[in-house]
Amino acid sequence: MYRVSTFVTGGLAVAWVAVMTVTAGAQNPGGSPEGKAMKNPVAATAASVTAGSQLYQKNCSFCHGPKGLGDGPLAPKDMMPANLTDATWVRGSTDGEIFKVIADGAGPDFKMKGVKGRIADNDIWNIVNFVRSIGPKTGAR
Ligand code: HEC
């Protein structure tokens, strides 16, 4: 898959084609239009939130903490995982943007790696629904 971006530099349009790599789909600070355009296909039922909670405890809590406060016991020292219960979504607040952080990783430094290929999309949406359930009740979806 290719991704084409066009920059206009001093009147010259420079087309830049980057081969899609593991990092190219990164969810960087500020969020992304692709993430905003994504619709969550999995309803936030109790079953979905429970499934997401189990996946979270296994794959995420050692960094983000059992309650999502960003205080996981095994997070590498300089890391500072995000508090998932506060109202700040550095990388975008919609379900799709949260999906992209989990799937593609937290760019640009990728201290948090994406789980794409390791966890099925459907289960990533379950995790999104769980993260929503512990997160702030307001904000764009
Ligand atoms: C190795 C530690 C680590 C693991 C494991 C990890 N994260 Fe992260 N996570 C981070 C770091 C570090 C950040 C970026 C903090 C920042 O903004 O500088 C982050 C950012 C995020 C964000 C963005 C928060 C925001 O404010 O936009 C979400 C959502 C998130 N993580 C969810 C998860 C979920 C869900 C999992 C499990 C599938 C997970 N993380 C696994 C370390 C981790």
Image (cartoon, rainbow, N blue to C red):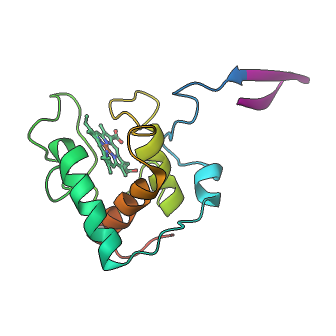
Q: Tell me which segment is drawn in magenta.
A: 1-17
Quadrant where ligand 1 appears: top left
In this picture, residue 20 sits left or right of residue 107: right
**Quarter of the image where the N terminus is located:** top right
In this picture, residue 102 sits left or right of residue 83: right
Comparing 50 with 99, the one in front is 50
Is 83 drawn above or below residue 104 in the view shown?
below
Is 127 drawn above or below residue 30 in the view shown?
below
In this picture, residue 61 sits left or right of residue 7: left
Comparing 81 with 114, the one in front is 114
Q: Quadrant of residue 119?
A: top left
Is 22 drawn above or below residue 44 in the view shown?
above
Q: Main secondary structure of the magenta part?
A: strand
Residue 85 showing in the rendered view? no
In this picture, residue 89 sits left or right of residue 19: left
Residue 67 image point, x, y percent: 16, 59
Residue 123 image point, x, y percent: 39, 56
Is 109 drawn above or below residue 62 in the view shown?
above
Q: Is residue 128 magenta?
A: no
Residue occupying the point 26% across, 53% down: 55
Residue 107 image point, x, y percent: 45, 33
Residue 27 image point, x, y percent: 50, 41
